Image (cartoon, rainbow, N blue to C red):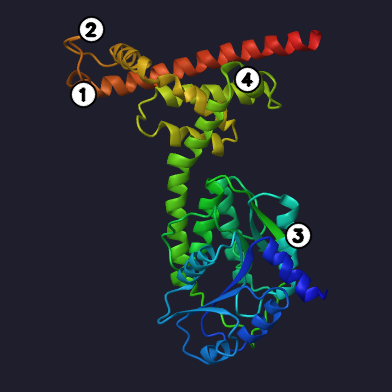
Amino acid sequence: MNSEATFNERMNQLKTCVIIPTYNNHKTVQRVIEGVLKFTSRIIVVNDGSTDATVDILNNYPQLILITIPTNKGKGNALRTGFIKAIELGFNYAITIDSDGQHFPSDIPVFLDALVQYNAPILLIGNRNMSQDGIPKKSSFGNNFSNFWFWFETGIKLQDTQSGYRLYPLQFIPKKLVTNKFELEIEVIVRTAWNGIPVSNVPINILYDPKERVSHFRPFTDFTRISILNTILVIITLFYIKPRNLFYNLKKKSLKEFVKENILESDESNLKKVLSMALGVFIGIAPFWGFQTVIVLALAYVLRLNKLLAFTFSNISFPPFIPFIIFASLKIGEFFISIEKPLVLNHSISFSSIQNNLIQYIIGSFVLASFMAVLFGVLGFLSLSFFSNFKNKK
């Protein structure tokens, strides 16, 4: 059995196809197709409204699954169209390769090897080694920019997040993607990672030939769209994804397991643990209602504290305690702001009475938050020091 038949059989066994989106790449698309055909005949080409000789070239390959979009709508839309078709045809995975000639079809086995080795759904991105000679500086900057925000949004560190040479687990990527242009490639990897699917790099080769390569990336327009998308993704990360993940982690553990793993037996210093607890208590009591989670996570990140501990202790203001925290804040505030009618903790206290004493409440809550943060910090430090000494003696 020749190598071409072997690779084709392997692609069939893994239910993997290749998707080639193309738009006015008549200089390179034939070479890309010929290269891919050496590994599989399961190729979906999405012609995104080409107006050059690309159409004539594609008509020479009747074995391709050709989808023609009458007018150019962007790479993201072309990929979405290809994904839908691949799923309809029963494929589990799709390798996407750009038609501008920068990718080598001979790297297809790299993706297959990694998929087999992982033996579970995974999204793979080709790592182009952007530090090598010949890579445009603007491409390196854009990639580093994208890598940082992907890490911030998912916690996953990658060396290349912008390569279009990828392997997608079709059953596990988001069913409804909202972007249509280049930014879709960012949306899909971030949201797939949010769904718990690993995202990893595999090494690939790259060719930048300015004489042949045609890039349709518009630096200002597309970079602006990508920046807007990242802004939205960061907001979702801070307000929903990170709190959700922390909640799931806490839910999986009993209180005893949580204390043991994250406090008593954690490798972090006692000071870092105590500061994390104190930060959580302060933000939990301070008058940041509705924003406590995002604030405590952001500060824990900036200060390099334990985000899980800070988030946990910020929940000191869970519902049964809220009336007592508000009342205590108001009473403490009386020492700083004089009022005509002191509040009493009974059925007569109302939201309007709190509104009438808003300044008193704000001052009192910050004082209470500071006091409780110091108290928890001191008690936490003494307890952790005692445990450490006890553990060393044993």
Where disc 3 sits, the SS reads helix
Where disc 2 sits, the SS reads loop
117, 49: nearer the viewer: 117
Q: Position of residue 334 (x, y in %)?
A: 28, 12
Give the label on residue 257, or none: 4
Q: CA distance from mark 4 to mark 3?
A: 38 Å
Residue drawn at x 42%, y 52% as measured from the top left = 232
Q: Quadrant of residue 71?
A: bottom left
Provide the residue designation for mark 3. Answer: 113
Provide the residue designation for mark 2. Answer: 346
Q: CA distance from mark 2 to mark 3?
A: 68 Å
Task: Answer with mark 4 or mark 2, whichever residue precedes in sequence.
Answer: 4
Pointer 2 local density, CA inside 10 Å: few below 14, some 14–19, many at least 20: few
Residue type beneath disc 2: Asn
Give the label on residue 286, or none: none
Q: Position of residue 26 (x, y in %)?
A: 57, 88
Provide the residue designation for mark 1. Answer: 355
238, 378: nearer the viewer: 238
Q: CA distance from mark 3 to mark 1?
A: 64 Å
Where disc 4 sits, the SS reads helix
99, 11: nearer the viewer: 11
Left or right of residue 183: residue 333: left
Task: Answer with mark 2 or mark 1, whichever residue precedes in sequence.
Answer: 2
Residue drawn at x 48%, y 32% as measured from the top left = 296
